[in-house]
Image: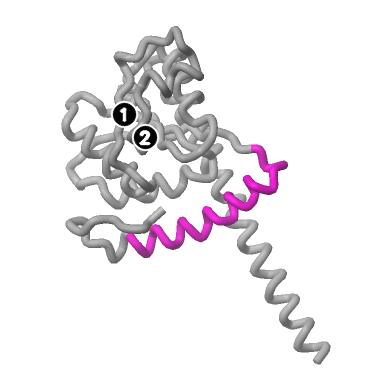
Amino acid sequence: MYRHFLSVVIILTSLFFCYSFACAILLLDARNEGKNSVSTFVQSPPDLIVVFTGGPKRIEFAVKKAQEFKQPNVFITGVHEKNSVRTIMNPIDPAETTDHIELDYTARNTVENVVSTLKYLRSNRGLNKILVISSDYHIMRIKMIFSSLMLEDEKFEFFFTPVPSDYLSFKNIKILYTEVFKLIRTKLFLIYWDQKSPIKNFY
C-alpha cells in the first residue's frame, strides 16, 4: 500500500515538474522573441503593429509602442462589437489620434486572431514586417498558428513583443499552466482542421 502511494506521488511530482518546465520554456521563448524584435526595429519601425485582445494591458502596451515608433499602423484583432477606436483609446490616451488604428470584430479566439491578421495583410500590400503584441505566455502559440496558416509563397516576417505578466499573482500562474494545455490542443486542432470549416467553441 505504501509503495503504491509512493509511486503515485513520484509520478504526480514528475508530471508537475515536467509541466512547470514547459511553462518556463513558454516564457523563455517569449523573452527571446522580445529581444529579437528590439534589435530588429532599432533603426526602422515595423510596417504594422498587431495586437491580440484577451489579456490586460495589451492594447495600452501596443499604443505606447506605436508612439515609440512614431505612429506606424495598428491593427487590433478580437474587439468586442460594442467598442470603437475612440472608446478603446479614451481610457489610454484621449488626445491620441486614431486614424492609424484599425479594428477587427470577427475574431473570437487565437486561431481567428491569426486568420483575421493574415486576411488584413493579404488585402493591404506593403506590410511585410509585422510586430505582434500579446501576453508573454501567449507568444509561442501565436507563432505556431502563424507558421501553420501562412501560405508557402508569403513573405511576411513576424516579430513578437510580449506583455509581461505578474507571476506573483496566482491567477496569472493558473493562466500560464492552462496555456500549456491550450498549446497542445491548438497543435492537434491545426493538424485536423479543414480550413473551409468554421471554428466553433475554440479558445
Task: Tell me the chief SS of the magenta region.
Answer: helix
Residue, far bottom: 1
Residue 155 lies in quadrant: top left
Colour scheme employed for the rendering of this structure: one colour
Which residue is identified by label 1?
A: 103
Q: Is residue 56 visible?
A: yes
Residue 98 lies in quadrant: top left
Q: Which residues are magenta?
A: 166-189
- Identify whether 193 is placed above or below 146: below
Residue, far front: 82
Which residue is identified by label 2?
A: 79
Tell me the distance, in whole angstroms, between the alpha carbons under discs 1 and 2: 7 Å
What amino acid is found at the position of numbered circle 2 in the picture? Val
Magenta stretch: residue 186 in it?
yes
Q: Is residue 35 visible?
A: no
Q: Residue at x 54, y 48 (%)?
A: 26
Q: Position of residue 42 (x, y in %)?
A: 45, 18
Q: How many labels, in total?
A: 2
C-beta proximity under 8 Å, tags 1 and 2: yes
Q: Earlier in the sequence, mark 1 or mark 2?
A: 2
Please tell me which residue lies in front, 159 or 122: 122
Q: Which mark is residue 128?
A: none
Please tell me which residue lies in front, 170 or 144: 170
